[in-house]
Image (cartoon, helix red, strand yellow):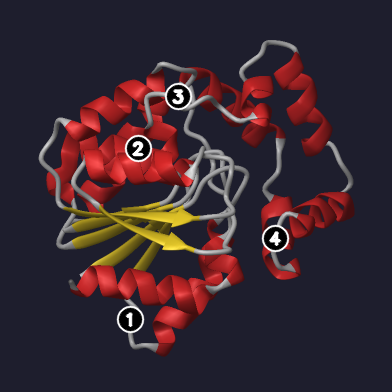
Amino acid sequence: MTKVFVHGNPETSAIWSLVVAELANRGISDVILLSPPGFGAPTPDGWDATQASYCAWLVGELEKIGGSIDLVGHDWGAGHVYGVIASRGELVRSWATDCGGLLHPDYVWHDNARVWQTQGAGEEAVGGFINMAATDKVAVLMSLGMTNEIAQDVASALTQDMARCILALYRSAAQPAMSVLGTQLGETQQPRGLVIIPTEDHFPGTTQMAAHTAAACGARAVELVGQGHWWMIADPVGAVDVLTEHWQS
């Protein structure tokens, strides 16, 4: 059974490095890390970086992998997973995601996202980050919870291409896009699901919103008390405990 991990924004697959090492310690080595186009991977010619295109990209990757897949998504990687489960759930044996609150009917995008969704202001905000000196990028990412090594890898991928993809993706996902996806997810038959709820991650709404999403789509919910957005970096052992329990249930 292949474990497939998908990361989000502004990230690279390096965010999973500590989890991969912990999985290896437990004898789990059939792991594939997928980087969405523009986020640590090149973009194809004509790539429009919309929510629908990323969902189609992930469907294609899973079809190529084949077999029995346990799919894990974080941040926008979770968003892409939700899209796949709502449309092609037969491609996976199980799924696990965070950011469940994004799909709640009352979810309002966080402050940064609303800026990125605004013409002009979004270009200015993303450009300011992308154009920082490399050392400043690393410092910002470390202040948000990344290790130095992971921050170095992510900082190297913060390019103009990523900036373009950030803006296009968030603009394509302006509400009611996410609430519509939540409705679709709740109306489809799915494989075994898990919604991970880090209690100190406030980007995707409240813990109650995430729990509502889990219940609406028949998934189990697990709270990571005291953990923030990069829970897989802060506590990789605990993260793997949760994931392996889910895979074995």
SS at circle 3: loop
* Residue on which disc 2 sits: 57
Q: Which residue is mark 1?
A: 28
Q: CA distance from mark 2 to mark 3?
A: 11 Å
Give the SS element for disc 1. loop
Above/below status of 124 relative to 88 = above
**Residue 228 visible, this angle:** yes
Q: Nearer the viewer, residue 76 or 194?
A: 194
Contact (Cβ within 8 Å) of mark 4 with mark 3: no
Which residue does the numbered mark 3 point to in the structure image?
A: 50
Sequence-earlier tag: 4 or 2:
2
Q: Nearer the viewer, residue 1 or 177?
A: 177
State the image quarter where residue 101 is shown. top left
Question: Mark 1 or mark 4: which comes first in sequence?
Answer: 1
Q: Amino acid at mark 2?
A: Trp
Badge 3, how many Cα within 10 Å: few under 14, some, many 20+? some
Three-letter residue code for mark 3: Thr
In this view, the residue farthest toward the front is 208
- Is 157 placed left or right of 77 in the picture? right
Mark 1 vs mark 2: in front: 1
Disc nearest the viewer among 1 and 4 = 4
Estimate how packed mark 4 is, as few (under 14), some (14 to 19) or many (20 or more) residues with alpha carbons within 10 Å.
some
